[in-house]
Each structure stands twice: as structure tokens, then as C-alpha cells.
Image: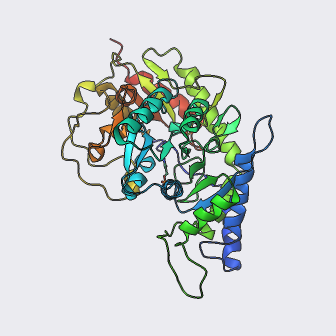
Amino acid sequence: MRERILLCLAHMSGKEQDFIKEAFDQNWVVPLGPNVNGFEKDLEAFVNNRDNNSPLHKEVVALSAGTAAVHLALIACGVGPGDEVLVQSFTFCASSHPITYLGATPVFIDSERDTWNMDPDLLEEAIKDRIAKTGKKPKAIIPVALYGMPYQADRIMEIANRYEIPVIEDAAEGFGSRFMGQVLGTFGKYGVLSFNGNKMITTSGGGALICENAEDKREIMWYATQARESYPYYQHEAIGYNYRMSNICAGIGRGQMTILDDHIAHHKHVQELYCELLKDVKGVTMHCNPGADYDSNFWLCTAELDPELKIKGQENAYKQVITGAVGGAAGVIHAASSAVTDCQPNDNVEALRMALDAANIESRPLWKPMHKQPVYKNAPAYVNGVSESLFATGICLPAGPYVTDDDVRYIVDNIKAAIDNQ
Ligand SMILES: *Cc1c(COP(=O)(O)O)cnc(C)c1O
């Protein structure tokens, strides 16, 4: 039996252990130290590099998670109880949950078809409507680079600047993706990165916030280390958090930075191979860069299934309550109360997922839009049907560093075999 092909499995360079050993040898087993500083320098060098252009001067803070980075960016934008934040609906929950941590309300914005990310027209409509309805401007805008694909950064930034609303780019999935030659996360006031176990690179768990200058970086670091005042005792005048990255995790990060470019090149190569092998398969459409300005890292490769496409056994999709869950290794999951919900992928998508699973291939539906999540049923949403329709038709395919050309051929062969041609 083949080994299971996973969506995106962490892959080590071998240098991680040298950096960790150094941390132990020098007794820096704490949430600060040479690896944290070194990792931040490496990240800054990477994000500040622009194609054919003068370098940027962004600063980076290493944190315990991408979710923590979103949370602290919101605090730095002054988000508090009663405020509203405009956030892409088509995303993982870490983009929007921290808004609720602060007692603020997420206002969900649907996607456009080209990038699957925040629709700039809906964004502007929402800004106008929220000002008309609440008398207040939303406090921040969070576009998300879904599966690595850049959002329309030029249009979103133009609108945000015109209304003077800060942008927090959620580039957690888009580390190393570029728009017009510039790394995602460097367009807005803040940029979020994630180094969770299944992201482009990993620190086992971790994240970072890209900031505009040293002063903003210091403020984020202050909040990330319990917001202490300079007294000989612990004096607190603001609420802080324990969100700094440990020197051990940063050691893993420094090792991972040595293979970041290789990882990005590999994901792009896998995407190209899927596109080539699936180009003549009717009813299966890969999600590609929509133009020359877009340079996705293809963190996960994604495809859409035509609703008319017949997959063998699709009449049996959703007949059983699922006992596991996506991301199942990551913790405790409540038991599902039913086999279906009122918003779910089409039967053919679920049938293909099951067929690939039986061939030992991990695949996954796209993110379920936040405006369709029960926990957000009362949040305002500006929708056009795009993310809901993509959720119904889309599927994520393996793309990580361990996915070989042979694996891609095997996956495509299994997709073709699952299609019911009669
Ligand atoms: C992974 C991810 C994050 C951050 O997640 P952490 O696991 O906390 O590092 C944020 N937003 C999106 C869209 C993500 O996929």
C-alpha cells in the first residue's frame, strides 16, 4: 500500500536541529533570544525584497501563532467593543475569530470569481452602508490570500486609503505569494503570517506580524509580552498577552527559511503539473493565477467540479454521520449531530473526496464561508453568492513538499477513475 498523500505535510531542512541545539547550549530556552531575533531578520529580508524594485523597510515580530498576529494587529488598529471590522467571508476562522475576542463585530465581505478573495466592489458598498447604518467607519479591513492566491491588492488598498481605514492582510496561507512583484503582507498597515504545521514553512506552531516601522513593531512586542511598564515591579496599565514566539520555535523557523524558496518553487511546480494533466478532463477546472500581476505560492492546489459532473457513488454521499473531522489531528472535536448541513459541498465533490480517501489521498472541501457558519449567524454580511458557490463546487488537492510528480499522476489517475463516464 502507498503511503497516504497528505495535503501539506511539514518538511525539515535538517538545519533546524542545529539552531535548537545552539539555543540549549546557550540556555536560551525562553520566548526571546538569538533565534527569535535571527528569524525576524530572515523574515524581514524575505518580505522586503521586491522584484525589479527598490527594497521595502518593513519590520517583523515573531509570535506564538498567526491567530495571535491577527489579534494584536486588531488591537493596534484600536478595535474594541462595539466596533466593526470588514473581513473576507471565504476564509479559515482565524481571520475573523479575533475580532470577537475584542467584543467587536465582524462584517463579512464576499469574494470575486478571479482570485476567490475579497470583492473590492462589495468592500466599498459595505463601507458606505456601514457608515450610513452605524454612523461610524469600520476600524479595519482584512483581505485573505486564500490558498495563497493574492487578492486584488491594488484596488483594495486604493479603497482603504480613500476611506482612511487600515488594512490587515491575512497572508497566513500566502507566505511568499506576490502581487505585482511585491510580497503579500507588505501592502497594508499590518501583514499576518502563519507557521503552523501545515503552512508553507513551520515552526511547529507560530506566526508573525509584518509592521510598517520600528515603532509599530515595539508596540506589538509590548502587547505580546504582557504590556509591562518600566518599574522594578510588575506595573500594568493596559491588558497584554503572552504571544511571543519561543527561541526554540524560532530555531525551527531559521532552519525552515533555508528551504522556503524551494518549498514555494515545489508548490508551483505541483500546480503546473495538475493543470497540465487535468487540462483535457471535462468538468474539472484548476484555480489558476488570473493574470500576470498574480503570483500565488499555491499553498494548496484547488479545483472546481462542474455540478453536472457525475462521480461514481455520488448518490451515497452524506449518507453517514462523519466521526472524524478536517484538521482532526489538531485537537478535540465535537460529535456531529447530523450527516448534512444547509450549506455543504455538492454530492459529486463529497464523492470525489471519499474516492480519493479510499486511494489513500487526502483532499478537503474549500473553507466554508464565515457568513454561513452558525456561530456568525447574526453578523452583517455583504454577499454575491460567489463564496457559497465555490464552497459547493471546490476541492483542495495535495501540494506539499512531499508530493512527488508520481503522486500527482496517481492523484489525477484517481480523479479520472472516479468520474462516471456512462
Ligand atoms: C492558518 C491561518 C491563520 C493563522 O493560523 P494559526 O494556526 O494561528 O497560525 C490565519 N488565517 C488563515 C486564513 C489561515 O489559514
Tell me: 319 left or right of 202. left
x then y, percent, for residue 418: 38, 24
Tell me: 248 left or right of 75. right
How many marks can you see? 0
- Residue visible at 59% across and 84% down in the picture: 231
x then y, percent, for residue 149: 56, 34
Residue 119 in view, yes or no: yes
Q: Is residue 66 above or below residue 156?
A: below
Q: Nearer the viewer, residue 237 or 135?
A: 135
Q: Is residue 327 above or below residue 314?
A: below
x then y, percent, for residue 203: 58, 59
Q: Nearer the viewer, residue 91 or 334?
A: 91
- Residue visible at 35% across and 29% down in the picture: 388
- Residue visible at 48% across and 34% down in the picture: 397
**Residue that lies at the very extreme toward the bottom in this rendered image:** 232
Q: Quadrant of residue 341?
A: top left
x then y, percent, for residue 409: 54, 28
Tell me: 341 left or right of 166. left
In which quadrant of the rendered image does the N terminus lie?
A: top left
**Residue that lies at the very extreme toward the top in this rendered image:** 422
Residue 15 in view, yes or no: no
